């Protein structure tokens, strides 16, 4: 059973910090902030950081690869998909790209999720929540697209992949 650090606020509202995050009626938080926190279901930063740092001189091949260069210079919203057999270094490469190589002038929105063969990291709802949480971190104005669905579903929204997909497509079509 995971341990939680609990902060108790007014009216017995509580915020649990640990492997599961829930925010209910915490004094001082706006509904936008509470909605945003609904999407923080797992410690995705920890999952990324479980992967080792790249060894000096490695992973640079991707930065000069023509397909990567084309993707990087594109003015369109595109996904960079890296695939290879297990153990080939995809996760190490992805961590290096996230932490170092794709950090730039702030014009890029970078969201990630590391799928692994375990219950916590092999779940579409968790991945979708993670990506939406990161998106709202970087572009807070987009939370407006989730508010009505959050008000309707509350924390159950975390398991409603179809609803989260609708939020994602609404963001894409209206932004």
Image: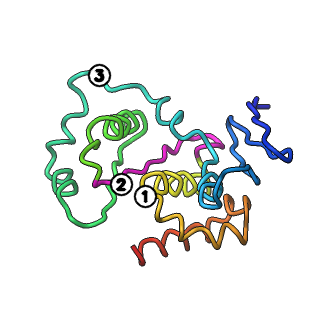
Label 1 secondary element = loop
Observer-nearest of 134 and 23: 23
Q: Identify the residue position indicated by label 2 in the image.
A: 109
The disc label shown at residue 163, or none: none
Asked if residue 66 lies left or right of residue 173, the reply is left
> Which one is earlier in the sequence, the residue at label 2 or at label 3?
3
Q: Are marks 2 and 1 in contact (CB under 8 Å)?
A: yes
Task: Work out whether 160 lies above or below 138.
Answer: below
> Which one is earlier in the sequence, the residue at label 2 or at label 1?
2
Asked if residue 12 lies left or right of residue 27, the reply is right
> Which one is earlier in the sequence, the residue at label 3 or at label 1?
3
Q: Distance between the Cα atoms at labels 3 and 1?
A: 32 Å
Q: Quadrant of the N terminus?
A: top right
The residue at 53%/53% (across/down) is 133
Label 2 secondary element = loop
Furthest-bottom residue in this view:
173
Q: Identify the residue position indicated by label 1 in the image.
A: 139
The residue at 53%/33% (across/down) is 46
- Classify mark 2: residues with Cα within 10 Å, few (<14), some (14-19) or many (20+): some
Q: Which residues are magenta?
A: 107-121
Q: Does 113 appear in magenta? A: yes
Name the magenta segment's main secondary structure.
loop
| Rendered location of residue 131, percent (x, y) | 50, 54
Q: Identify the residue position indicated by label 3 in the image.
A: 55
- Classify mark 3: residues with Cα within 10 Å, few (<14), some (14-19) or many (20+): few
Image depth: mark 2 or mark 3 in front: 2
Q: Quadrant of residue 75?
A: bottom left
């Amino acid at each position: 059973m995971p341990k939680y650090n609990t902060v108790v606020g007014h009216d017995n509202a509580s915020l649990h910090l640990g492997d599961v995050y829930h925010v209910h009626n915490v004094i001082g938080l706006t509904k936008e902030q509470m909605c945003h926190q609904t999407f923080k279901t797992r410690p995705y930063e920890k999952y990324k950081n479980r992967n080792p740092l790249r060894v000096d001189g490695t992973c640079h091949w991707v930065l000069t690869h023509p397909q990567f260069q084309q993707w990087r210079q594109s003015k369109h919203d595109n996904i960079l998909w890296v695939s290879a057999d297990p153990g080939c270094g995809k996760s190490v490469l992805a961590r290096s790209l996230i932490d170092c190589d794709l950090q730039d002038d702030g014009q890029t929105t970078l969201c990630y999720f590391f799928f692994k063969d375990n219950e916590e990291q092999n779940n579409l709802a968790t991945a979708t929540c993670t990506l939406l949480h990161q998106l709202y971190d970087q572009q807070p104005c987009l939370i407006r697209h989730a508010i009505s669905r959050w008000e309707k579903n509350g924390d159950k929204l975390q398991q409603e992949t179809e609803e989260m997909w609708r939020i994602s497509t609404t963001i894409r079509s209206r932004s």
